[in-house]
Image: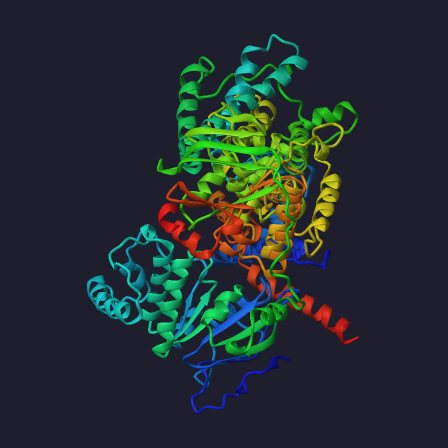
Amino acid sequence: MSKNAPSGPLPRWMELGLLPLLNLLLALVVSGLVIVAIGENPFDALVSLVQGAVGSEEGIGYTLYYATDMIFVGLAVAMAFHCGMFNIGCEGQAYVAGLGVALVCLYLDFLPWFIVVPIAMIGGIVFGALWAAIPGWLQARRGSHIVITTIMFNFISYAMMNYLLVHVLIKRGQMSPESRTFAPHTALPMMDSALGAIGIHITETPLNTSIFWAIACLVFVWLFLWHTRWGYAIRVVGTNPKAAVYGGIEPGRQIIIAMILSGALVSGVAINEVMGAQQKLQIGFTEGYGFTGIAVALMGRNHPFGILLASLLFGALIQGGGALSFDMPNISREMVWVIQGLVILFTGALESMFRPALTRFAASLKARATEPAKAA
Amino acid sequence: MADNTMGTSPAHSSGTPPAIELRGIDKRFGAVHANKSIDLVVERGHIHGIVGENGAGKSTLMSILYGFYEADAGEILVNGEAVRITESRDAIRHGIGMVHQHFMLVDVFTVIENVILGAEDGPLLRESVARARRSLKELAEKYHLEVDPDAVVGQLPVGAQQRVEILKALYRSAEILILDEPTGVLTPQEADHLFRVLARLRDEGKTIILITHKLREIMAITDRVSVMRQGQMVAHRVTKETSPAELGELMVGRKIVTQISRANKAPGETRLTVEKLQVRDPNGVERVKGVSFSVRGGEIVGIAGVSGNGQTELLEALSGIRRPSNGTIAVSGQTIFPAAQYAPHILAHHKVRHVPEDRQRMGLVTAFTATECMMLGDEDDPAYHQKNGILIDWQKVAKDAATKMSAFDVRPMAPGLKTANFSGGNQQKIILAREMERNPDVLLVGQPTRGVDIGAIEFIHRRLLAMRDLGKAILLVSVELDEIFALSDRILVMFDGHIVGEVPAAEANEKKLGLLMAGVTQDAAE
């Protein structure tokens, strides 16, 4: 019994492989129908989308660049989720983290690169973490629901950043609300120049070295949540707060810690965008990735490995979608959002749709496997 | 399969068809074969008991009858007619009602609103309410099911809430009532009341299926009894012709010892001293109102009382979960409360460990594996960490879990299995293993055998007594008087937040304790 005992309703390969694949397939079928409805060939569209995402060095570069953002947000959502919270304030936290990065890059650029680059990253992390810590504190100590407060904090961050960019940080003598471009030595190296330095030449894309930070974060979250006592405490609070209290773990404390970590993780978006791709602070640089990342976490089952795969998929969708609307003018940018929305709908919100059928299928497979053994 | 010694054959000799007949019911959940070709006949106008250990398949069988699950194979006959029950609506239509172990009531609604919920006559409630009021009055008079129809359900005592559940079923004109472990949450008095109601219902021609693991209840109230073991129906008996010993043996599959012999031993030094302890619940209501007692090494002090008289809050305060509002607590002569820092891990440091009343919601994280749960409360112990002090050494934790689980005979011996997938008794053993193998000086135990099967009860009682014989101090809170009698050296009775009496185990009997539990003072009781 020991090893074959049912540890869940579905075998692992179905839970992590087949189920997401079926959901994705269904999303593609429905998207195809939408494309048929507007009079285009869905197969051409699919080819264009895939080609755009992974068909060229440039496409791959952009896909990975978008995936970097998705990894950070996905991890941030997962971290809060494992403590029993739904952090939908990633957008605002990333935005404020961008301020932290920019302040360092703008005002401490007299320092040499090996000092200013880590400080700028830390600046982003601290700002993002603090912005997330306030709703965390409110939840833990005042019982204000995290979903409500993080939404409100998104709006506060938009207003605050608007004001700062329009009135304070704006480069004098220009119309668009953005800071001046950072001094080159304060920014993160782009991937093409980084690889160029060791003799590998790739096409220039916004892909930059922050992707290594994303990978480090993936490993960190995995180790932290499943292999440290601190992560254990967070998971106990997230699954059974009463048991946590019984075991001497104070839930409020863990909630604040989890939100700080969540904000710290999502600040990676600011590092990727502000410090890497754009090298200046622009209005609305987060582009809604803080919301798309929620679907990434859902699809990735809040596990770093799943989040990695889901991030690559969403990176490809964002990049491929752009290419698609370029190739097929009938399919507008908005149409591409519809397709992305369908993928989110079927892989995120409706992710359990096939579960009952699959569970029956798994049970029948098992029965078929055990019966001949019994007969023999 | 079933060994049948009933006077009548399952095909019933009398003219009227049985109220319920199950033929060859079979149900699998993945690899688990929960019901193996079950046959059951329930005669009309009978109280039919179904006993079995946890995990024997009783609840699955009843869920199939009530339409929560669909059987893989087999037939259901109601009043002799084959019926298809795929959802509870079908069951209700065929006159089957169910009173669940955990009530399905809306706490903020009144009794009458709960009763008509889902059985409204039309879009306007007024007429439904009026009709329900009349019919509730009739039902209450007929079956002694008195409940104030306008009381808010959440404010009613548990026994009254259960009566609302029964009323709900009767209001939907149920002829066959299924009760799943109905006395688990009741005081002895409330249980007696329930049995009077059930007897009355039977006399009025209703059929009752009573699922329980308490043999005493089976003997007291049922006409017939069926025994399940490991998914099979192993025997049917006429209650008058059987005995608790026989039923217990059929349930467990071997002889069981109900009375465990205990060594006479003089208690040692005082381990736990509680003085004038006051505890408030989260709403600020004082639930423990100045309680003083002590527990010495080598003795088990039992706290008896009707559930809800402050025992839960007392245990929570002593274990550090809830901060007392006043009073002192000392462990082995050292004052640990009042103190700035008062929490479970501080008590653990003073070698006080706690087996909580609610194992699923407090003692375990049921989504975690047994290995993960074995570390709960001790995750800071360096023995569980790798040399770097940062990462958990899961191999060590798993090894530790396996050792402790085998010491407590946890089945299946699968540390990697989620604790939700263990039976109640084995979940409890996992918690006991975790807390007792840490070798505490003081063990606080709440309801150690609630919802636990007989075999496991015997095992757990033995372990607690063995610990007492090792000179440990044990404070036992239980609403099961049998358990209090079987284990305690001294018995304290709690009523309304006070300790209203202390009785040495040798002088205790059910009547004496019953009066104290009902709030009659000790002087009057003697």
Viewer-side residue, B2 vs B78: B2
Percent coordinates x, y for residue A98 in the rendering: 52, 24
In the picture shown, does residue B287 fall above or below B116?
A: above
* Labels in figure, total: 0
- Residue A351, can we see it? no
Write down the quadrant of residue A63 in the picture: top right
- Residue B31, can we see it? yes
Tell me the quadrant of the picture where the N terminus of chain A can be found: bottom right
Percent coordinates x, y for residue A130 in the rendering: 50, 24
Tell me the quadrant of the picture where the C terminus of chain A can be found: bottom right
Horizontally, residue B383 falls left or right of residue A182, namely right
- Residue with the most extreme front position: B526
Viewer-side residue, B282 vs A273: B282
Percent coordinates x, y for residue B333 in the rendering: 57, 27
Q: At 77% from the left edge and 71% from the top edge, which residue is drawn?
A: A373
Horizontally, residue B110 falls left or right of residue A8, namely left
Colour convention: rainbow
Percent coordinates x, y for residue B334 in the rendering: 56, 25
- Residue with the most extreme top position: A110
Write down the quadrant of residue A296 in the picture: top right
Viewer-side residue, A339 vs B237: B237
Q: At 49% from the left edge and 40% from the top edge, which residue is drawn?
A: B315
Q: At 37% from the left edge and 44% from the top edge, which residue is drawn?
A: B496
